[in-house]
Image: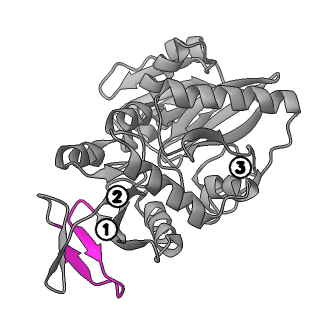
Amino acid sequence: MKKNIAIIMGGYSSEIEISLKSGNIVYKYLDKKKYNAYRVSVLKEKWVALDEFDNEIPINKNDFSFLLNGKTINFHCVFNAIHGDPGENGVILAYFDLIGLKYTSALSYQSALTFNKRDTLSVLKDYGIKVADSFYLNKGDEINSNKILDKIGLPCFVKPNKAGSSFGISKVYSLDKLLPAIHKAFIEDSEILIESFLDGTEVSVGVIQFKGEAKVLPITEIVTENDFFDYEAKYEGKSKEITPARISLEEQSKVEKVAKKVYKILNMSGFSRSEFILVNHVPYFLEINTVPGLTEESILPQQAKVAGISLKELFDNVIVSSLSNSK
């Protein structure tokens, strides 16, 4: 019997449009011989299933079902394609836990932890993972620019603590630019992180649960035309993403080892994509994404393609893994 799969997309954050693209790609490539796939748009103002003609049908929030032609459609599994709130931060996943519905991404606690950059860094530092120096601010805190830069130095990065797709991030070169960058980051989040600049090669590493084991995908090197890998570089063609990365075998081995270690330390499942900077051949961890972009141009699908894994196989594998998961 075919399994009913809900592909959730949209969300409540600035990443809504990217999420909708990811969700539609999953819908396009999901094996229709094996699954009844339904897109579910999760927005602040409404949760609706979309039929094949994009007609909206309200979702019953009591059990995440909906009525189609007089028949109740219940789901066997949710494919999480929501970047940011409430998909990547674990909020909607906790709801699925409550109603007993399986889903494809990391578990709700792991998602909440990894969405919080500061807390993720705190956990990983205790395991010897190298990270940049950082300074943390809550909205309303006294801002002492000199104190911050005494610790962090220039240039530095100012970023929202809980946001994705490089929204609200600034690279700061001088004292007078720090305060405007802080205010920009606070538009996206009430908590921000200020990190020292790491001068090196940026790489992105996909680690996925594949056929029962954690698998490291071919590494991608990020070469941006902009000052850093910002939204424009990520989504508007202002960067080169080179897979496999042009790094030495020694560097490749080190990055793969650390990326897999991070995946296991954080008790990940499903997809993940971690970002690192190689400084003097040593990988420094930046962040991890538990709901990475899934369009054909996105980094994780690029890596899967180089590894010989089609989108159809990639998406099928994560659903099979989720359905067989006893958690």
Q: Report the amino acid beneath label 2.
A: Val
Q: In this view, does 197 lie to the left or right of 43?
A: right
Please identify the quarter of the rendering in which residue 309 is found.
Answer: bottom right
State the image coordinates of residue 245 (x, y, percent, origin top left): 81, 44
State the image coordinates of residue 10 (x, y, percent, origin top left): 36, 62
Asked whether residue 95 is drawn in magenta, I would say no
> Looking at the rendering, in which quadrant would you find the C terminus?
top left
What colouring method underlies this structural image? one colour
Decide: is 117 above or below 208. above
Q: Distance between the residues labelled 1 and 2?
A: 9 Å
What secondary structure is marked by label 1?
Answer: strand
Residue range highlighted in magenta: 43-59
State the image coordinates of residue 128 (x, y, percent, origin top left): 60, 12
Q: Earlier in the sequence, mark 1 or mark 3?
A: 1
Q: Which of marks 1 and 2 is nearer the N terminus?
A: 1
Q: Report whether residue 174 is seen.
A: no
Q: Is residue 7 left or right of residue 316?
A: left
Q: How far apart are marks 1 and 3 (CA)?
A: 35 Å
Q: Earlier in the sequence, mark 3 or mark 2?
A: 2
The residue positioned farthest toward the front in the image shown: 1
Q: Distance between the residues labelled 3 and 2?
A: 36 Å
Q: Report whether residue 256 is seen.
A: yes
Q: Is residue 310 left or right of residue 243?
A: left
Residue on which disc 3 sits: 226
In the image, what residue occupies the spot 39% across and 23% down? 137
Tell us which disc is closer to us: 3 or 2: 2
Question: Which mark identifies residue 78?
Answer: 2
What secondary structure is marked by label 3?
Answer: loop
What secondary structure is marked by label 2?
Answer: strand
Question: Which mark identifies residue 40?
Answer: 1
Q: Report the amino acid beneath label 1.
A: Val
